[in-house]
Image (cartoon, helix red, strand yellow):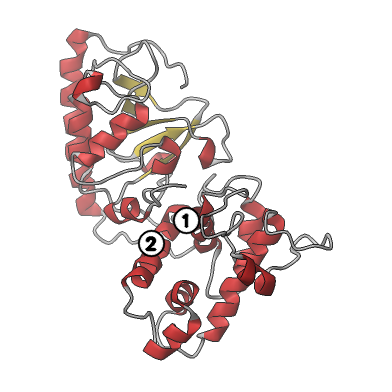
Amino acid sequence: MTVRKAWIVGTAVVGGSLAFVMLLVVGVYLVAGNLVNGVRGGSKALAKGSVPAAYQPLVQKYGNMCPAINPALLAAQLYQESGFNPNAKSPAAAQGIAQFIPGTWATHGVDGDGDGDRDVWDPRDAIPSAAKYDCTLAEYVKDVPGDPTKNMLAAYNAGAYAVIKYRGVPPYKETQNYVRTITTLEESFAAPTTRLDPSKQAAGAIHYAQKKLGTPYLWGGNGTPEQGGRFDCSGLTKAAYESVGIELPRVANDQYNAGPHPSRDELLPGDLVFFSPDPTNSRAIDHVGIYVGGGYMIDAPYTGAVIRFDPIDTAKYFGATRVTEDGAKALPSAV
């Protein structure tokens, strides 16, 4: 974890700081009243660093292969399938960053990098192949009524015949969940183009975190009685949002995908703020805190420190996430 600056408030100041925090939290709801017309952005340009830099140009290029897909949607599929791991292999023998099974790869794999072979383990082949497969499925179901992207995703999960038979997303729970998951995750990979609605749970998450001020840090800490109620950074943010009914992943770099990403000047109290040694790759995130306003967060910094207020504007500031219930639910259990 990154070494943070020394305490910015003493014990006598903490009480006043908490009042300051609560004023900021009230501001969440005042701002909410001004954002009732906010909608998620229509553009699907990739959010900053949401795709590892090595794959970002491929996702951006091939995510525009046909109208049924876009870069953020393609990124969501790759993240759901493998967590951008080019060496991933499933018990069902699905392989590579796009998790093709051998039979599907034999039919739909392409030589994306023009080196004379089709290598399922090479993202330069697998990512274009994933986009091509999506577009092929979209063509199969192009005459089916409804949203062409959702129909394509349903065909990916259940087969084109089922989509044609039911004239849209078939009534299979697994397929409906898959379509909902990918279209929700898509928003966490897209750069927003409009203001984002504040989280209804933000105030409660901050209230939970502020009650933990002064608690010693514990690597791997989840705040259990056996751990003396101590936390590490992502353990604290997970517990804070769990207290208001939102289940986040345990690891900070997965928490980054739990909702859309406001810019620095659009931050609201309750947003999660993230830090990374690599400004181009969300998978390298190594610290997270809860924004409280005024350029400060509550975080669990490092061994030997306590949960405290820290400034967010450091060299490692990566970006922020406005946690949503649907966004958290869409995250894969393991990536």
Instruction: Please tell me which residue is depicted at 47% across the width and 20% down the height of the picture.
Output: 2
Residue wearing tag 1: 80
Instruction: Please tell me which residue is depicted at 70% across the width and 54% down the height of the picture.
Output: 122
Position above or below: 207 against 320: above
* Residue 65 visible somewhere in the drawing: no
Q: Mark 1 and 2 residues: CB-CB less than 8 Å, in contact?
A: yes
The local secondary structure at tag 2 comes to helix
In the image: residue 263, left or right of residue 322: right
Residue wearing tag 2: 181
Which of the two labelled residues, at mark 1 and mark 2, occupies the earlier sequence position?
1
What is the C-alpha distance between the residues marked 1 and 2? 9 Å
Position above or below: 71 against 51: below
Q: List x then y, in percent, for residue 285.
A: 49, 34
Instruction: Please tell me which residue is depicted at 22% across the width and 33% down the height of the picture.
Output: 206
Position above or below: 153 against 195: below
Q: List x then y, in percent, for residue 302.
A: 40, 17
Q: List x then y, in percent, for residue 81.
A: 50, 57
Image quadrant where residue 4 sits: top left
Residue 97, label in figure: none
Q: List x then y, in percent, for residue 236.
A: 29, 30
Q: Which amino acid does label 1 sit on?
A: Gln
- Classify 10 Å Cα crowding around label 1: few (below 14), some (14-19), many (20 and above): many
In the image: residue 310, left or right of residue 246: right
